[in-house]
Each structure stands twice: as C-alpha cells, then as structure tokens.
Amino acid sequence: MKAVILESYVMKEGDLDWSGVKALIPDTTSYVRTAYEEIAPRIGGAEVVFLNKCRMDEAVLAQCPNLKFVGIIATGTDNLDLEACRRHGVAVANVPGYSTYSVAQMTFSLLLAICQCAERYDRAVKDGCWQLDIPASYGLLPQVELFGKTFGVYGYGSIGRQTARIAKAFGMRVLVCTRTVRPEYSADGVEFVEFDTLLRESDVLSLHCPATPKTRGLISADALARMKPGAILLNTARGALVDEEAVAAALRSDLLGFYGADAFGTEPLPQESPLRKEPHAILTPHIAWTTKEALQNLMDITTRNLRTFLDGNGENIVNR
C-alpha cells in the first residue's frame, strides 16, 4: 500500500509529526505543498492521501482509480466533493474536536484585545509612555468590563460550548442560538434563543458554526442593522459566515463597535480588503487552531483515523 501527503506542515516545516502515519504505511511520499494541477499526478496509484486545503473533486478522482481513503487534516471539508468521493468509493475522514480549547481561547484573546488592548499598552510603555501621555497613534480603544454583559453564541458544537463556559466564568450572561438543543445542555446555565433575539440582545456575538448553504452570509447588512448598536462581533469559525464589506461599513458608521476575526472569506486576506484599514477591527491570520497542543491532537486523531480504516472500520468517516 502507498500513501501520499500533499501538504506536510501547517505554519512551518516539521510542525506536524507524521511518524504514526509512516509507521502504518512505510511507503509514504511527502510534499510540502501541492498546487491543484499537481494533485492527481502526485497521488498516482496511491490508495491513501492526506491533505489540508487541496481540492479533491471529480476531475482529480477520475485520475486516481486506486484511491480508497482521504484523510483531511482539518475538521471542515469545504474543499472536498464528498459526494464525488462516495461515488468513487473513497472514504473521507476528518479530525473533529482537536482544536476546541485552542479556538475558544483565541476567541477570548480577540475579545480581550478589543476590551483592554494589552498589546498596544505594552508597546506604548516600552516606548516610554505612561497612562495619560499615550499618543493616539497607538490606537488605544475604550476599556470595557465584560462582567454582566451578554455574550451571544451562534452554533453550539464543542467550540461554541467551550466558549460559552469561558464567558460564564467572566460573569457574562450567555445566549445561544443553535439548530439542535440537546438534553445535556440543560446544566450549562445558558439561554437558548432565536437568531433575532441573539442579534438584538448580545453585547458580544461570537460565531461557531460551519459554513453551509444556510449559514453562508449569516452576518449580512440586515443582520448587522438588527444588532445592538456598538456591539462586538467575533468570528473564529469560517469567513464565509460574514459579509466583510457590510462589516467594514458597519464599523465606519459606528453601527458595529468592534470586529475580531481569525477567519476570512478569502485567505490570505486581500490587501485591498476594507477590514485592513479599520482601527476597530482586530485581525489574526487564521491561526487559532495552531497551538502546539492542538497540532499534536490533530496528528494523533489523523493516525487513529488511518489505523481504524485499515482495520476495516474507520473513525470519523464523513461520507459513508
């Protein structure tokens, strides 16, 4: 059996440990990065492939008749045609839950950067400033206390739920809008509401759902107009959930107070994006999931997915 790794690292070479995969399939070829036109030739006659952002579609699958298993080293499968994989008899396994705590932590890192500006104050102090003599050029924002504020969560999977726990620990009231309310949620101490109520009452609204036909463009100009004036919007989920032009316009008009994001509709974020010029936008380059601990979880689950597939069952298969 032969395996091919199309994208071997996340942020820098060597940050993913592929030893578990290579122990299961010694004949494994690894590539640092792979362009779309290189995917099929590099897979060739391999039965197993691992990828992250590479596109897997009908055209690629038609050229890879031996392929039986695709391991995506991510949770989301937006870049894979799951139905085409099913038609070709190719099982696709994803990696759910590996970055739950890291992404929830980043959500609050963005929120605290907005509310207390520790990094900007740090630069000012190291440059010789103190309290009342800090120039406007440092871009300090008004200090905000979170205690007693209302924290809204859209999507209550593992990340949304962990984010809600953190908000509760800050003394915030937590509202949740989710497709399915499960019995075990009753002990969480949160309120389940409709989307309109979530928009209207949240001081902070945090997005934690996948990008689906129903949720793409969820935060539109209309949704922003229904939010509490001056509210904070956070997106550590998927860029497609948000109309970024509408968000930039809402920031300019002070309809929206602040925007914190680690995911964007186009990545890398284009230089011409209006968000780059917004002083009330805190932006990070889609790195919430790249803590050392999360990457180890990622590879542990990836290896287990392969092992169980080879054993004849397969965990986390998303296109049975």
Image (cartoon, rainbow, N blue to C red):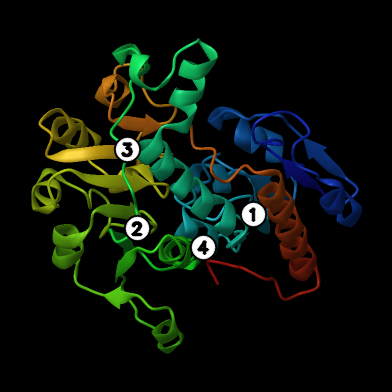
Q: Tag 1's secondary structure?
A: strand
Q: In 3D space, how far apart are the residues under numbered discs 1 and 4 (Cα atoms)? A: 14 Å
Nearer-N-terminus badge (1/3): 1
Q: Residues within 10 Å of mark 1 (few under 14, many from 20)?
A: many
Q: Quadrant of residue 277?
A: top left
Rendered image: mark on residue 143? 3
Q: Residues within 10 Å of mark 3 (few under 14, many from 20)?
A: few
Nearer-N-terminus badge (1/4): 1
Q: Label 3 sits on what residue type?
A: Gln
Please provide percent x and percent y for residue 229: 12, 46
Q: Are marks 1 and 4 in contact (CB under 8 Å)?
A: no
| Residue at x-position 53% and y-position 45% | 56
Q: Label 4 sits on what residue type?
A: Arg
Q: In 3D space, how far apart are the residues under numbered discs 1 and 3 (Cα atoms)? A: 47 Å
Give the labeled residue for mark 4: 87
Q: In 3D space, how far apart are the residues under numbered discs 3 and 2 (Cα atoms)? A: 13 Å
Give the labeled residue for mark 2: 147
Nearer-N-terminus badge (4/2): 4
Q: Residues within 10 Å of mark 4 (few under 14, many from 20)?
A: few
